[in-house]
Image: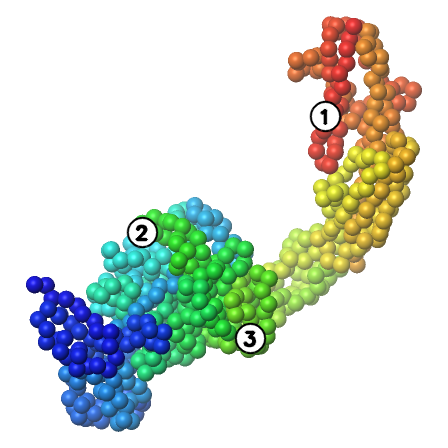
Amino acid sequence: MKKLLFLCLLVGWFHVVAQLRQHPEVLLAHPIMLNQEGEESAGFTDLVIAKPRDGVTESEITAAFRAGDLDVRIDRTDTDPNIYVTSPAVLSDPLTVCETLNQTGLFEYTQPNCLRFVETAGTPNDPLYSANWGLAKINLPAAWDMTTGCANIKIAIIDDGVQLNHPDLVANMLPGFDATNSGTNGGHVAGEEMHGTFCAGFAAASGNNGIGVTGVAYNSKIIPIRALSTNLASDITLDQFIATAINHAVNVKGVDILCMSWGLVASNPAIDAAIYNALNNVAISGRSGKGTILIGAVGNKGEPTFRPLPGNATSVLMVGASLSNDTRWPKSNYAVKQVDVMAPGALVTTIAGSGYANQPAENATSWSAAAISGLAALILSVNPNLTETQVRRIIAESAEKVGGYTYAVGNGATFADLSHNNEMGYGRVSALKALEKAAGAPMIGPDLICNNGGYTLTAFPAGSSAVWSAFPGLSMNGNLATRQNGYSGAGTITATLTVPNACATIPVRRTIWVGNPNLTKTVNGAVSGTTSVSPGSSYNLAASSSSPGATFNYNNYAGSGNMTIDLYTPNNPTSQMYVYSNSTDGFRQVKLTATNACGNYAEDFVFLLESGFKVYPNPAMGKITLEFANTAMLAAMPSKIELFAEKSTQSVRSVVIREVFDIKGFHEGNKLHWNVSDLPRGTYYLHATRSENSREVVDKLKVILE
């Protein structure tokens, strides 16, 4: 009969486990620890992990192991400081073995090599770029104008493996590593979830390759590290696998960022030392002493807590999932003071198998953490000399305080001087602001140039230099911008940085205004030129300008006919106009003037109170007269008048009013005469085309010829 894997849910009752191991139907039996919440948190195996203290000799270590009758299964290496030992005593009572070794004083820590339960936290030409709404939400298109990621920046996806031949990943894939000793080279195993593949797609799927999706750092590299066991299940791993994965990724592969979109079920500090030690060491020693950037996911249960590993390690940036309306995804965990930042995660599109899919929301924080791993790669592409603490702070400090939440200084555990909210952390990330900050922005200098102005960066990256340029309507001498040829309009100041060790120059841009203001005017919210009005009615006028510091003035200065208006608050950006109820016809011109420190610019509102025009006689025989109420101003008249036979699309008479207006061709000052004696008798329609709120309107009048 087939033997069974049997895990005993007991703590300390090792004699029961020993009896179970003697049963002929039991293949394996190991005790499992329960945490305070009663969850299965860790299962003991046949190994104990021991890390010798610095300065301890090999002979002292050997003597300690011999005294405990312990055999070395896996010795330490340059990249993994741990020694893995076993013995019958480890099988019986691993905690006592650890305590005995600790009492020697030779070891920094000892712990059982535990079986862990894992919770996975889940404008290029690529056709599915627009399907991932999160890229635009965090302003990645503008950030990509600065960098799309350097090829020498490497992201390790520590997960259940990555599909090594995916067409949207293969160009960015470097050789990986299988910490589970299953020989996959970091690849995905058929039949298991593709969690690691999904994460790789968010972080660094190839961009501008004409297929699929776009990763955040789409020119940086991915190193797949398999740490969730192939042989056991994709949601179970060993301490040995996790610690080895972390150490190998940094010490052998030389990665810059660890993406860890998972959490281990809460257990006990006594058995967490190997993983904590690995995380803390690489945060200090990685990247030649600048520290590896560590990214984790808060989890997807909607609880005010998250799994302690890797989240409780000091240097891990913990990422939650936000929605398209910039609120917390309801199932994103929100541990008090512990969430660092939020990023889009729910219902976004990424890689799936050899294709693409809208990813399930239940793993949304996994996708958010993977995206922030890509953002960290972009930051290092801008300034590779930053420490891991500086990178984490840039991401937190540049995050936007969105969603209507209350953010308070001192509330967050990571950066006490930044405002923080328990649900949203330091805010929803902004890729552009983060990259600008990494490059030394914001740029300091005037928002408005009338003649000239000087610019600099808040903090140039150490050892960097800048070449300054400006356009349009500006010349640049060093960092001094000068207005050219009376130009008025938007201008862009650019500092192109050369940063030590960066793979390319980095442009930092700022948009300013040059010269006199521009002007946009609206009536009742619609952009307007000539507007038809009615007696006894009020109209809301509004003005805006792209120029900083612009002021506005409305002046009722010209008109004709029997039309009277009032303007309220004429020196504000918004005003209200009232047309007196006893007005009958005419027009008024209201000059709107925008003024800034450089000068002014003006445009007219034209308000037309139309009595229209009369057509007589009607019915008519040989002649039709068109009599206009107002011919003093072209804007107050139709642009064209045409006569159509009923059911015909071809006009039989037409006149362009501008042509008559220009030659003063009106009879008696306001009349036009049409000879219609040659037209067949019947029903006709007169079409008068006029402009209203920047669109053409056609008024129609029925005319009978007898």
Question: Which numbered marker is on residue 698?
Answer: 1
- Viewer-nearest residue: 31 or 254: 31
The residue drawn where x is 39% and y is 59% is 363
Q: CA distance from mark 3 to mark 1?
A: 63 Å
Mark 2 and mark 3 residues within 8 Å of each other at the beta carbon: no
The residue drawn where x is 84% and y is 33% is 609
Q: Secondary structure at mark 1?
A: strand
- 210 sits left or right of 637 in the view: left
- Viewer-nearest residue: 178 or 170: 178
Q: Quadrant of residue 648?
A: top right
Instruction: Tell me if residue 270 comes above or below residue 566 in the rendering.
Output: below
> Where in the figure is residue 463, as x and y percent of width and height?
53, 74
The residue drawn where x is 43% and y is 45% is 127
Q: Secondary structure at mark 3?
A: loop
* N-term-proximal mark, 2 vs 1: 2
Q: CA distance from mark 2 to mark 1?
A: 57 Å
Q: Which residue is mark 3?
A: 411
Question: What's the amino acid at mark 1?
Answer: Val
Question: What's the amino acid at mark 3?
Answer: Asn
Question: What's the amino acid at mark 2?
Answer: Gly
Q: Quadrant of the C terminus?
A: top right
The residue drawn where x is 33% and y is 55% is 170
Q: Secondary structure at mark 2?
A: loop
* N-term-proximal mark, 2 vs 3: 2
Q: Which residue is mark 2?
A: 353
Q: Quadrant of the N terminus?
A: bottom left
